[in-house]
Amino acid sequence: MSITSALVLFSVIWFMTFLIVLPIRVRTQGDLGDIVPGTHAGAPEHHYLKRKAWITTGVSVVLWCVIAGIILSGWITVDDINLLKVMPPLE
């Protein structure tokens, strides 16, 4: 795995994890009963974005280490996921 592949893999894992973590523990204006005129009731009042970014980074590092280890060890290869036999075998 090249450096570019490792960075792309980490970026994909980070953003997917961030999109999962983002709606957790969101306190909306509707929940608190303090809706600012002109805004939606579902607008976040307390979003804790910095904490969520750090949590996402920690989880992403662990997931990246596991996935990169599986890729680098050769435990799962492209031939293993070539179910329709559309890719030529690697030699």
Image (tube, rainbow, N blue to C red):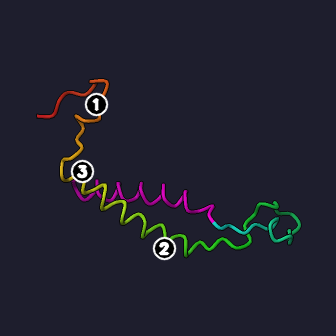
> Which residue extends farthest front?
75
Provide the residue designation for mark 3: 71
In the depicted structure, whether residue 54 falls above or below residue 65: below
Mark closest to the chain's N terminus, 2 or 1: 2
Q: Amino acid at mark 1?
A: Asn
Q: As drawn, is 36 to the left or to the right of 24?
A: right
In the depicted structure, whether residue 84 falls above or below residue 54: above
Q: Position of residue 23 (x, y in %)?
A: 63, 61
Distance from the alpha carbon under mark 3 to that under mark 2? 25 Å
Q: Position of residue 6 (x, y in %)?
A: 29, 57
Q: Which residues are magenta?
A: 1-24
Distance from the alpha carbon under mark 2 to that under mark 1? 36 Å
Provide the residue designation for mark 2: 54
Mark 2 crowd level (few <14, some 14–19, many ≥20, 10 Å Cα): few
Q: Which mark is residue 82?
A: 1
Q: Amino acid at mark 3?
A: Ile
Q: Give the structural element (helix, strand or loop) at label 3.
A: helix
Q: As drawn, is 10 to the left or to the right of 91?
A: right
Q: As drawn, is 3 to the left or to the right of 24?
A: left
